[in-house]
Amino acid sequence: MTFQNKTVWITGASSGIGQALAEQFAAQGANVILTARRKERLDTILAGLAPGKHRIVPLDLSQPERLLQDLPSILDEIGRVDILINNAGISQRSLFLENEFKVYRQLMEVNYFGLVAMTKAVLPRMIEAGGGSVVSISSVAGKVGSKLRTGYSGSKYAVVGFMDCLRAEVSEYGIHCLTICPGSVRTAIAHHSLNGQGVAQNKPEPSIENGMDPDEAAKQMLKAIAARKDEVVIGQGISGWAPTIKRFFPQLFNLMTAKMSYR
Ligand SMILES: NC(=O)c1ccc[n+]([C@@H]2O[C@H](COP(=O)([O-])OP(=O)(O)OC[C@H]3O[C@@H](n4cnc5c(N)ncnc54)[C@H](OP(=O)(O)O)[C@@H]3O)[C@@H](O)[C@H]2O)c1
């Protein structure tokens, strides 16, 4: 599959993995639509993309009902979308016993309901147009659990389940559904991760700082999209191996995560 002249809509394109995806799709001749909240960052990234019919569509995915109202007219303007990449997301670093309940809603609104709303608006038009790809970025945390991530993991497991069911329902319309589960990737995700009060912790984290280069992660993602894979884990070291270890040695894995120190 070539991405030349394909229209690719990427959420969470103002930073990290989404930015790297936008740059690589543009370099391969795609027309990229960049979505996130920070318009000025989207403008800067747009200005640096290889030539193409790119555009920004600033949106807040934490308000899915509003999205459902606004997206039809936005889609009328955009026209055909060949690939939707549901990448926007926020993480969490806080213990269940210390979390305010609202943290769970904040995570689900963006990571799950925002993603469902985007898909709800885009997918029927893809089917009408005769095909396309829906790609959702879950996480290794959507395959295995660990401390400090009850809300984040819950939202990312939900994405895996949603995508598995969607794939079963829409493959007959020529729609490809890919779930990507990255391990640690070197982005701003730790800075943006919520604490127990639902506020960004705004500090770095060694596992993320030492994670995979976002350009390398994006390269592997484009390869998986082109190969029309159903689900891929993309990660290096333990963060890439964790789902396999959990699958074959679940008790050992659970013991290891329970013993892991977190502060
Ligand atoms: N980095 C990792 O280690 C890792 C591992 C596994 C999975 N992931 C997943 O990969 C995806 C991208 O994360 P990243 O690592 O690139 O982190 P990042 O650098 O923090 O990027 C997150 C992106 O999501 C957007 N976003 C957050 N809240 C939003 C909202 N309410 N509405 C619209 N956009 C919103 C942000 O844009 P604005 O702030 O401008 O809105 C930003 O563009 C996420 O789904 C994350 O869970 C990352």
Image: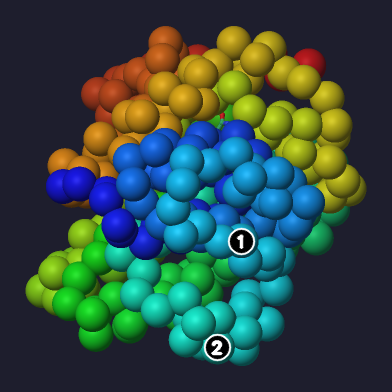
Residue located farthest toward the left when viewing the structure as drawn: 172
Residue 73's disc is 2
Q: Quadrant of ligand 1?
A: top right
Residue 56's disc is 1
Query: Which one is earlier in the sequence, the residue at label 2 or at label 1?
Result: 1
Dividing the picture into quadrants, the one containing residue 55 is bottom right
Q: Which element is circle 2 on?
A: helix
| Three-letter code for the amino acid on which mark 1 is drawn | Ile
Residue 164 image point, x, y percent:
28, 59
| Image: 26 above or below 135 | above
Dividing the picture into quadrants, the one containing residue 61 is bottom right
| Image: 255 above or below 196 | above
Q: Is residue 26 left or right of residue 223?
A: right
The residue lying at 52 percent from left, 74 percent from top is: 117
Q: Is residue 7 left or right of residue 93?
A: left
| Three-letter code for the amino acid on which mark 2 is drawn | Ser
Residue 90 image point, x, y percent:
67, 46
For disc 2, does the CB lie below 8 Å from ligand 1? no
